Amino acid sequence: MDVMMKGKPLTTNSTVPVKGEQAPDFSLNDLNEKTISLSDYKGEVVLISTFPDINTSTCSRQTAKFNEMARTLDSTRILSISTNTKEEQKDWCSAKEIDMDLLHDSDRSFSKAYGLYVEEMDKTARAVFVLNREGQIVYREVVKEMSQDPNYEEAIAAARHEEAEMT
C-alpha cells in the first residue's frame, strides 16, 4: 500500500487487512513487559491505533486523543501500537493518565502482519482498526498522509456501534 510522509511517497510491506476480514492475531509486550495477544480480547470490541513515532506531535496527539475518547466508551479495549521502544513509550506516558494498552512492536511482527511496515523509515504506518467481538474488522482507516490525524470521530462511532450490537 502506498502512503506518504510530508508528501514523500512510501510503500508498506504488504496488503493491509480490509473491512470484513478476520484481524490477524498478534502478541506484543506492554509497558510492564506483559505479553498482550489480540486473542485475549475475544468477545470484546477492540480499537487498534497504530502510529509511526510517539515523539512527534501528530502521534502524541493521536494517542492522547484515543486515550481521552476511550473514557466515553463502555466496553471497547484500545490498543495503541508503535515501533517505539518501551522506554520511549514510558517517557511519553509518565505525565499522563493512560486508560489503554500501549504496546511496542519491537520485532515489527505486528506491523508486517498487518501490512503497515514502512521499511524505508523502519516505522509503522498510521492506521486505525475497529474489531467486533468475533475479531472481524468492521472499520479500517489507513491514513494516506502519515503526518495527518486519523478520523477520530468515525473510529469511535464504529466502536460505539459495535458496543450497541453487544447488548
Image: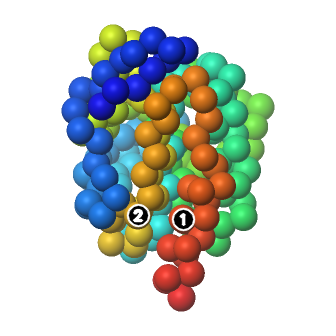
Residue 50, image x, y percentages: 47, 38
- Cα separation, mark 1 vs mark 2, equals 7 Å
Q: Which residue is painted at 56% across and 81% down in the image?
A: 164
Q: Of label 1 and label 2, which has the lower sequence position?
A: 2
Rendered view: 129 above or below 40? above
Label 1 sits on a secondary structure element that is helix
Residue 24, image x, y percentages: 25, 51
Residue 80, image x, y percentages: 52, 42
Q: How many marks?
A: 2
110 displayed left or right of 5: left
77 displayed left or right of 68: left
Rendered view: 71 above or below 55? below
Q: Are marks 1 and 2 in contact (CB under 8 Å)?
A: yes
Rendered view: 45 above or below 51? below
| Residue topped by disc 2 | 138
Q: Residue furthest bottom?
A: 167
Q: Amino acid at mark 1?
A: Ala
Q: Which residue is painted at 33% across and 11% down in the image?
A: 120
Q: Which residue is painted at 62% across and 19% down in the image?
A: 55
State the quadrant of the C terminus. bottom right
State the quadrant of the N terminus. top left
Residue 7, image x, y percentages: 51, 15
> Is residue 106 visible to us here?
no
**How busy is the neighbourhood of tag 1: few (under 14 within 10 Å), some, or many (20 plus)?**
many
Observer-nearest of 165 and 9: 9
**How busy is the neighbourhood of tag 2: few (under 14 within 10 Å), some, or many (20 plus)?**
many
Task: Say the numbered circle drawn on residue 84.
Answer: none
Label 2 sits on a secondary structure element that is strand
> Is residue 125 visible to us here?
yes
Rendered view: 29 above or below 145? below
Task: Say the numbered circle drawn on residue 158.
Answer: 1
Q: Which residue is painted at 60% across and 29% down in the image?
A: 148
